[in-house]
Amino acid sequence: MNFLRNLLASIIGCILAFGIVFVMFLIFISLIGNDEDSVTVKDNSILELQLQRPIADYTGSRDLDPFSGIFESSQGLDEILHAITVAKDDDRIQGISINNNFIIAGLAQTQTLRKALSEFKDSGKFIYAYGDFYTQKDYYLASVADSVYMNPVGVLDFKGLSSEVLFYKDLQQKTGVKMEVIRHGKYKSAVEPFLENEMSDANRAQISELIHSLWNSMVSEIAVERSISEENLNTIADTLGGRSPKFAKTSGLIDDIVFYDQYEDVLRNALYDGDKEEVSINYITVDDYTKYSNKKILRSGKDKIAVVFAQGEIFYGEGGPNIIGQGIINEALIKAREDKNVKAIVLRVNSPGGSALTSDIIWREVELTKKVKPVVVSMGNVAASGGYYIAAGADKIYAEPTTVTGSIGVFGTIPNINELAKNIGINAEQVGTNRNSVDYSLFEPMKDDFRNRVQESIEDTYETFLERVSAGRNISMAQADSLAQGRVWSGVDAKRLGLIDELGTLEDAIAAAAEMAELGEYGIRKYPKYKTGFERFMEDLSGVSAKTKEKVLREDLGNEAYSIIQEFKSAMEQKGVQARLPFVLNIK
């Protein structure tokens, strides 16, 4: 019976595998027949900026990969910005419609997009925005438009930024699952959620200062475009003056309340200088336009600037599109360093940190590289702890005003289930050959000897981190320590304190690198070269199932319960000394 069952399972598996390959073949044939050359940009077109997939700084899409974009869950910020720049000088594109976004991007990414749209407007072309629902980031982006429109029954969220931190001390006591925390003595807020039931005054103060700085950056830009004073914008936020379409229009946050078909009349008027109700609008989505714009090289020359994208948490190993590993990052740095045509390197960092060991390995490669060629860092949404570690040694550091950086500190978290084991009747016994051969068991209370050894490692790593910052920023160890202790800063405050050199975008960092290398004409080379989406898909078909299970789990538990489980899971998976943001910083 088992033989027949196994045989049937094998047959079904073969049929499914053949079906998947056959579908892939059909997709491939379809793509060959509908390649990028078939993308037509008509005269009098509007570029539709509808960003409903997560935005990554870089997806590593390859122009020659027929499956590029098919298996990618993210949109590349670099490609979107390039498309907007190309559209600015494309006579067939008359304007941009920012349409019903629910933008899944960091604040610094949104700020960069906003700046690109502002530069697009400088060409004399129009930008209009429409929304059924505006989140605060959606409105921040939309506020750059010439006019902002809203559905008659829509909602606009404009109330100021907030952050919520969950604490797990009681949960650990009730479940018997505990996180043993070892940290540098002055590192006040590190892993505080595992140690306390409420936020410390120091932690509250630093988060408050951070989100106030980020909010001030947003408000100052909105004030310019909407011709509303910053004081009035804060009053609108305090009184929820945008909570309904009527209030939003009265307060000046939007220009008019219309249905979408009426919004399209506005677009027709802009296109044809009059009411052309019967004339269709030639929309082209940013995804489609990217297939055209990616072929347009805006910079060229034998000399190159390499842009190395380091995005995601830092783990020891090879790394990938969403994980920074010393494997792919150091390989990229070495390739750029040894390429005679590459004259300078920009390291784009978007990371909350992670493994201190991996951070130091990458830091060393940056040190070796800058002895040969200029290295400039561009910080994205976050370049904190390990993210700052790998940036600290660069010749020059740029950050966005809304970048979250700093968090210079280290800690270790080690799971312990001694209490749970006792409650459910588990007793673990250990046998070893030497005094320290059994150094730790998660089934036993942590021994003082082991804790002291880990504490020693923490202190050594923290001291090394400070040395890297001190040398990189040309400040004393005492100064580095005063800026450290896990404190997080906005880009604005980091500039004031000397943790970075300039406020600016990735483009500004590239321009600085070109100036340092004394380049006139130059091209851009992007690293790392990830495996194609199709290659990753075929290597990990089980990933589709895992993502489906993750989605079901999130729906069953709810976002809050799911995020608690994920935070515990992340803490339990951490190996070695960590240089990362001390808690999940969720800014809303």
Image (cartoon, rainbow, N blue to C red):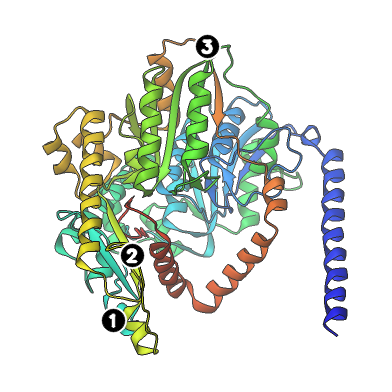
Say what secondary structure mark 3 lies in: loop
Q: Position of residue 214 (x, y in %)?
A: 30, 48
Amino acid type of the residue that numbered disc 3 sits on in the rendered structure: Glu
> What quarter of the picture does the C terminus occupy?
bottom left
Q: Which residue is denoted by mark 2 in the rendering?
A: 414
Amino acid type of the residue that numbered disc 2 sits on in the rendered structure: Ile
State if disc 1 and disc 3 touch (CB < 8 Å). Answer: no
Nearest to viewer (mark 3 / mark 1): 1
Q: Compared to 134, does 306 lie above or below?
A: above
Q: Which residue does the image show at 61% across and 70% down from the upper left?
A: 549
Residue most toward the front? 433
In the figure, residue 541 lies in which quadrant?
bottom right
Instruction: Specify few, some or many for label 2: CA neighbours under 10 Å numbering under 14, 14-19, or 20 or more.
Output: some
Q: Nearer the viewer, residue 345 or 491?
A: 345
In the figure, residue 5 lies in which quadrant?
bottom right
| Measured Cα–Cα span from mark 2 to mark 3 | 52 Å
Residue 173 got which mark? 1
Q: Which callout, 2 or 1, points at the residue further toward the start of the chain?
A: 1
Q: Residue 363: tell me if it is visible.
A: yes
Instruction: Specify few, some or many for label 1: CA neighbours under 10 Å numbering under 14, 14-19, or 20 or more.
Output: few
Nearest to viewer (mark 2 / mark 1): 2
Q: Compared to 552, does 250 lie above or below?
A: above
| Measured Cα–Cα span from mark 3 to mark 1 | 63 Å
Q: Position of residue 205 (x, y in %)?
A: 18, 57
Say what secondary structure mark 2 lies in: strand
